[in-house]
Image (cartoon, coloured by chain):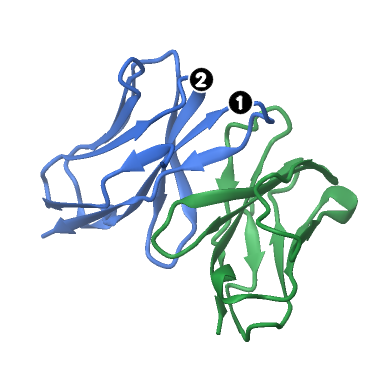
Chain colours: A green, B blue
């Protein structure tokens, strides 16, 4: 069974540009999460989808970040316009409908804003 | 302050036991986790323990939970060079929001010397 996949694995953009990260969860996993790790810091929660609905988006840093999950399958996280402090590794995780405590993570997307 | 704390570095010799420690602050934690991140890879769910348990053993891994002191540890027996990685402690509690959001520590870099 395929795990959580993320694309791209690495993105380097200039300040002010737009970047879109994609996450494909494990098939059948209704729960999808986005997390971010800024260099050397803890991994922080961004938001949680249940199917296509945003269950909890309290971790989103500001309105430059937009997450979508149309159709309840894959999800995108857009950063527009990107700032230097957005650099970090963005992780996606997914879990089964009634096993939200068992989250499986993707390999992450390393975003570098210059 | 941080909700989940762990030491940043640990070095051991191959064949010795490793003990990685973690403290957390939320007494309502439901599940506590250990994730492993190898270089260039994503987060691998190693093991987790439900808050009403004191211990969980899985092959070379032993998780100990002291709920009174809010202390979690991961012991790796017969540590191998392949165990070199970053180990993240995490907890999952319902803090007025949806159960499912994980709170992570900064990670402990385990280095195993041959």
| Residue name at image x 74 percent, y 47 percent | A27
Q: CA distance from mark 1 to mark 2?
A: 7 Å
- Label 1: element kind: loop
Which chain is mark 1 on? B
Dividing the picture into quarters, in which one does residue B72 lie? top left
Q: Position of residue B100 (x, y in %)?
A: 63, 34
Q: Is A24 left, or right, of B111 in this rendering? A: right
Q: Count how many numbered circles sit on residues in the image.
A: 2
Q: Are marks 1 and 2 on the same chain?
A: yes
Q: Which residue was labeled with disc 1?
A: B94
Which chain is mark 2 on? B
Are the residues tagged 1 and 2 within 8 Å (C-beta)?
A: yes
The numbered mark at residue A77 is: none
| Residue name at image x 56 percent, y 76 percent | A84
Q: Position of residue A22 (x, y in %)?
A: 72, 65
Q: Mark 1, residues whose alpha carbon is within 10 Å: few (<14), some, or many (≥20)?
A: some
Image quarter where the C terminus of chain B lies is: bottom left
Q: Which residue was labeled with disc 2?
A: B28
Q: Position of residue A40 (x, y in %)?
A: 39, 61
Q: Is B93 left, or right, of A75 in this rendering? A: left
Q: Is B66 left, or right, of B17 in this rendering? A: right
Q: Nearer the viewer, residue B13 or A89?
A: A89
Image quarter where the N terminus of chain B lies is: top left
- Label 2: element kind: loop
Q: Nearer the viewer, residue B73 or A1?
A: B73
Q: Position of residue A28 (x, y in %)?
A: 76, 42
């Amino acid at each position: 069974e395929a795990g959580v996949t993320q694309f791209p694995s690495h993105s380097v953009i200039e300040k002010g540009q737009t970047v879109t990260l994609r996450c494909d969860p494990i098939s059948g996993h209704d729960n999808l999460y986005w997390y971010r790790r800024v260099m050397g810091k803890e991994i922080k929660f961004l938001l949680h989808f249940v199917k296509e609905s945003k269950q909890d988006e309290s971790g989103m840093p500001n309105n430059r970040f937009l997450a979508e999950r149309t159709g309840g399958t894959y999800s995108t996280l857009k950063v527009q316009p990107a700032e230097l402090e957005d650099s970090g590794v963005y992780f996606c995780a997914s879990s089964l409908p009634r096993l939200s405590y068992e989250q499986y993570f993707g390999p992450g997307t390393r975003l570098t804003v210059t | 302050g941080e909700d989940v704390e762990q030491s940043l570095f640990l070095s051991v010799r191959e064949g010795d036991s490793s003990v990685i420690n973690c403290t957390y602050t939320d007494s309502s934690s439901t599940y506590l986790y250990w994730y492993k991140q190898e270089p260039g890879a994503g987060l691998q769910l190693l093991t987790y323990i439900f808050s009403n348990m004191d211990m969980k053993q899985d092959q070379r891994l032993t998780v100990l939970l002291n709920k009174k002191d809010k202390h979690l540890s991961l012991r790796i027996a017969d540590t191998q060079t392949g165990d070199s990685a970053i180990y993240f402690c995490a907890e999952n509690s319902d803090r007025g929001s949806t159960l499912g959001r994980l709170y992570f520590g900064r990670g402990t870099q385990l280095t195993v010397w041959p």
